[in-house]
Image: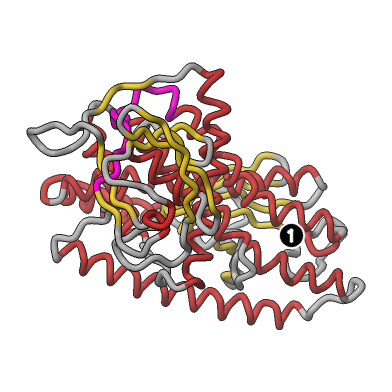
Amino acid sequence: MNEEWRERATPFSVSKDPNAEGEPGGNGWQNWISLGIVAVGIVLAAIFARSALQSTTLFLLILLGLVMAHEAAHFFTAKAFGIHVHEFAFGFPPRIWGKRFGETLYSINWLPIGGFVRLEGEEAPEGPRSFATQAAWKRFIVLASGAVINLLLPLVLFAFALTFPHQIPEGRAVVTGIMPGTPAETAGLQTGDVILTVAGREAKNIVEASRYVRLNQGKTFDVEVRRGSETKNVAVYGRWAPPAGQGPTGISIAPVTVNPADGRPYTVTEQQPPWESIPNAARMTWDTMILARNEVIGWFKGTGGPQLAGPVGIAQTTGEVARSSETAGGAIAPLLELAALLSINLGIMNLLPLPMLDGGRIFFLLIEVVRGGKRIAPEREAIVHMIGFAAFALLAIVVTFADISRILGGGSSLP
């Protein structure tokens, strides 16, 4: 059977008409040769690039978890609507192992960078149980379910991150400088003011103070400060496009107390019970989405373009987070937070109306609804998605090259 590669739900998800509807794909000797090559590569990496191997392994585990959750959402919603699911795959071909349960083949493949769900009739009607023959609202749910799960998963990840013991900076933020002609100067903030609350939310440390300010960009909000023995409320405007190095309000802040040994703030270990971590996780998830929205608005307001990172850059970030958090006394919570942030990014990205992504397919579906059920020819839609796939592949190559160049130059992915 000819092999046809077609895009599916995520940028990591490609659907394939496999060379074997039956169980394991590929010949036995080919699998053993592939296994030998992979084993040799792992051994060499463990000897000569242990740190890179650890970072890559952590990144792949996080990525696989997020993408498989995404694909599982497509799988279960398709099953719920009676759509024929040909295959639910872990990784990309060539196939290592496959087992058919009922009408669906469950497979494990050699390339552990994602997964895919292969539905009957994804582009054109091929039978009464094909995806393309379903009502528009059913197809919308199947297409959107993956991104929705990625946006809901951080509720669990953040909750566990807050429940596990984790380090937080100790001490409130103090204003150490005010730029002339900025909203902070206009509002009357002064050097030495200790920030207590921002927009009604208690800022217990420098991280929270900075985050709450960025959450309120484009607004005038109250900042409660302690000035000497007095407490004052100051109304400050958060700019969308501040000059480089100034921040939305034009102040510089620092912890009230720092460790004289390294100049960093002292940290304390915090561990929240579930009745606190769950609602706080919901707020963190919402805050992160608002920050993502503000970041995009800032691009159009003049703060610069997006800072892109490919798989290599994200793997480096994963390793740096793990190593820094181990030094601080615990790696689980920061990695869970990183996974939550990646999941939100994956969910938002897949809802964008771009070719190849779920949002691109939803866009074509909405056009169909507006046209009273008249569909765009599958061949034309496939061409658009193919062009999108090529554009994403080219972008991935460029970003990966930039990441490798930065790493070889000794650069870090963390600020």
Q: Amino acid at mark 1?
A: Glu
Where residue 331 appears, as percent x and y from the top left, is 30, 32
The residue sitting at 48% across, 63% down in the picture is 240
For residue 54, side relative to residue 187 (left or right): left
Q: Quadrant of residue 406?
A: bottom left
The location of residue 285, given as percent across then percent down, is 54, 41
Query: Is residue 319 visible to us here?
Result: no
Instruction: Between residue 120 and residue 281, name the one nearer to us.
Output: 281
Position in image of residue 108 (x %, y %): 49, 47
* 75 vs 284: above or below: below
Looking at the image, is 132 positioned above or below residue 54? below
**Rendered view: 378 above or below 96:** below
**Image-based side of 280 in relation to 415, left or right:** right
Dot 1 alpha-carbon crowd within 10 angstroms: few under 14, some 14 to 19, many 20 or more: many
**Most foreground residue, 325 or 99:** 325
Residue at the spot 85% in from the left edge and 62% down from the top edge: 133
Quarter of the image with the N terminus is bottom right
Question: Is residue 75 visible to the viewer in this orientation of the structure?
Answer: yes
Left or right? Give the position of 15 relative to 142. left
Please name whichever residue, 110 or 404, is drawn nearer the observer in this view of the structure. 404
Q: Residue furthest right?
A: 372
Any magenta on residue 28?
no
Query: What colour scheme has been applied to the protein in the rendered image?
Result: secondary structure
Q: Is residue 174 magenta?
A: yes
Residue span colored magenta: 161-176
Q: Which residue corresponds to the image point at 46% horizontal and 58% vertical from the top-left?
A: 94
Residue that carries the numbered disc 1 in the rendered image: 120
Q: Which residue is found at the position 63% from the left and 56% from the top? A: 21
The percent position of residue 405, horizontal first and vertical second, equals 21, 69
Task: Report whether 373 appears left or right of 36.
Answer: right
Viewer-proximal residue among 368 and 204: 204
